[in-house]
Each structure stands twice: as C-alpha cells, then as structure tokens.
Amino acid sequence: MSHPTKRIVVKEGDIDEGIIPVVAWLNSFYTVCTYASCQGDQTVKDGSCLPYVTFVCGHTDDLMAIKKTVREAYAKLPTQERYKPGELPTVDGINLDTNFRTCGAGEVTSFHLWFTNQTALQIFIDHLRIKGKDHAVPNMEVS
C-alpha cells in the first residue's frame, strides 16, 4: 500500500564535536539511527571513556556496508592501536559490539562502535573522508 509521504527532521541532539563525523556518517544510512555517542576523554587512562557511537540498524545491507568500512579502517590502524583478543568485545575482529535488549513489544539489536583512542578515531574519520564519495562526512577534526 502506498501513502503520500514527506521527509522531515525527526530529532536533533547535542553531539561531542570530535565524534560528529562518525555520527553523521552512520545517520546517512537510511535505516540507521544513532542514539548515544562520546568523543572519549584521553585523560582517563583506565579505558572507561573511549570514543564510541551506539546505533540501531534496520537493514542488513546497511549493516554490511558499515562493517565493510569499519574493517577497511581497522586495517589501517598501526598494530599498537588495535584491540588485543579478549580486551573488549569484538565482532569479526573489528571494534563493533552487538547488544540485544527487550524494548516494548520486541527485541532491539543495537550496535556499539568503539575506538581504542583518539588516534584510532581520527584514522577512522580520515578513512571516511577518503571514502567520501559514498557518504557525506562533515569536515571536522578531532581535538
């Protein structure tokens, strides 16, 4: 059944400036919605304040495109910037964690994209800019 539709902006939010390129890139996918993020705090040394974005994704094609980009960027990381096995949850050797929770009438799968530190975040953002032909990424630097 086809109904008339109109595209609207549903939500705005205050986003840490250092993570905006990643949030904007993820939200450029039609079925992705980000709902939590942090640019991290390099002064916290125990790993409790790493850069991350949490999102939901409604279509496998979008998720596979995201995972492909994450893998490509991960391959560019210097070895010392990569997670060690068992250090943090990973899927397919990348810094993408899957969470399942009950929400209302069903279950929601959310994804948590982690970065080892500010260097890893900047490498990822730079990779997105190089791939810019696929998805728009704001021209912002991580501070």
Image: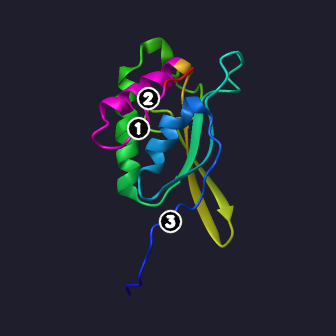
Residue behind mark 3: 8
For the residue labelled by badge 1, is the local secondary structure a helix, a strand or a loop?
loop
Left or right of residue 6: residue 36:
right
* Image: 3 above or below 60: below
Looking at the image, is mark 1 or mark 2 earlier in the sequence?
2
What distance separates the C-alpha of mark 3 from that of mark 1? 20 Å
Q: Which amino acid does label 1 sit on?
A: Val
Q: Is residue 135 magenta?
A: yes
Percent of width and height locating residue 27 = 48, 49
* Residue at (57% x, 40% y) in the render: 53
Which numbered tag is attached to residue 85? Answer: none
| Residue at image coords 57%, 20% | 143
Please name the residue that numbered disc 2 is placed on: 125
Callout in the foreground (3, 1):
3
Height in image: 54 above or below 117?
A: below
Q: Which of marks 1 and 2 is in front?
A: 1
Residues shaded magenta: 119-140
Residue that label 1 marks: 137
Measured in 3D between alpha carbons, the distance from the residue under mark 3 to the one under mark 2, in whole angstroms, is 27 Å
Q: Do the residues labelled 3 and 2 touch (CB within 8 Å)?
A: no
Relative to 8, say whether 21 is above or below: above
Of pointers 3 and 1, the one earlier in the residue sequence: 3
- Amino acid carrying label 2: it is Ile
Q: Position of residue 101 (x, y in %)?
A: 65, 57
Type of amino acid at the residue the image marks with label 3: Ile
Task: Out of 33 and 109, give the one closest to the viewer.
Answer: 33
Which quadrant of the figure contains the N terminus?
Answer: bottom left
- In this picture the colour scheme is rainbow
